[in-house]
Image (cartoon, rainbow, N blue to C red):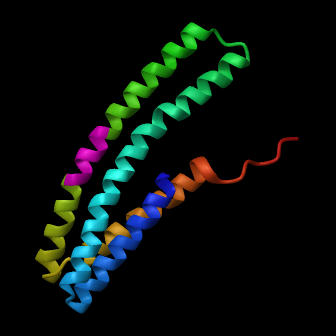
Amino acid sequence: MPFWTFAAMAAGAATVLTASRQHSLVLFLAGFVALFALSGVGNGSTYKMIPAIHRVRADTAIRAGADPVATERAAHRSISALIGLAGAVGAFGGVLVNIAFRQAFLTAHNGDAAYLVFLSYYALCLLLTWFAYLRPAAPRH
């Protein structure tokens, strides 16, 4: 789900960039409404994905012979820490969005540079998500 959310957010940012260049308020609003809604979907899927990944890893370790109590405890600690880290990164992201807009308007008197940065960020997120979770597994010999 996060992969497709990043793809849709890139489309939303491209829509906003296009609207800015065409001076289209309707397209601009549509792009930003999509971005706001998709950021909520992305947050929700991220917070759901973190425990799911660690529970699968814990179950795999337990099936391989690891101590169930210690493995579950370690998974719970990792889940808690990563959810806290994701919240902190998300909060900092809100600050970075404002900084990107401020800098874009100070230098170019429009937000186009900020929208391009957001597009680049979503492309990076797509690549990292694919690499970490979706790429085909290498054959084992």
Percent across and percent down for residue 111 are: 20, 77
Percent across and percent down for residue 124 are: 46, 61
Q: Measured along the vertical axis of the image, is residue 131 above or below residue 109?
A: above
Q: In which quarter of the image is the C terminus?
A: top right
Q: In this view, does 46 lie to the left or right of 92?
A: right
Percent across and percent down for residue 115 are: 29, 73
Q: Which of 43 and 131 is in front in this view?
A: 43
The stretch in magenta equals 87-94
Can you see residue 37? yes
Q: In this view, does 89 lie to the left or right of 24?
A: right
Q: Quarter of the image holding residue 16?
A: bottom left
Q: Nearer the viewer, residue 62 or 88?
A: 62
Q: Measured along the vertical axis of the image, is residue 1 above or below residue 26?
A: above
Residue located 21% across and 87% down the image: 24
Farthest residue to the right: give it. Answer: 141
Q: In this view, does 31 lie to the left or right of 52?
A: left
Q: In this view, does 112 lie to the left or right of 68?
A: left
Q: Quarter of the image holding residue 37?
A: bottom left
Residue located 23% across and 45% down the image: 91
Q: Which of 22 and 104 is in front in this view?
A: 22
Q: Quarter of the image holding residue 121?
A: bottom left
**Per the image, is 91 magenta?**
yes
Residue located 27% across and 74% down the image: 30
Percent across and percent down for residue 33 are: 25, 67
Residue located 26% across and 82% down the image: 27
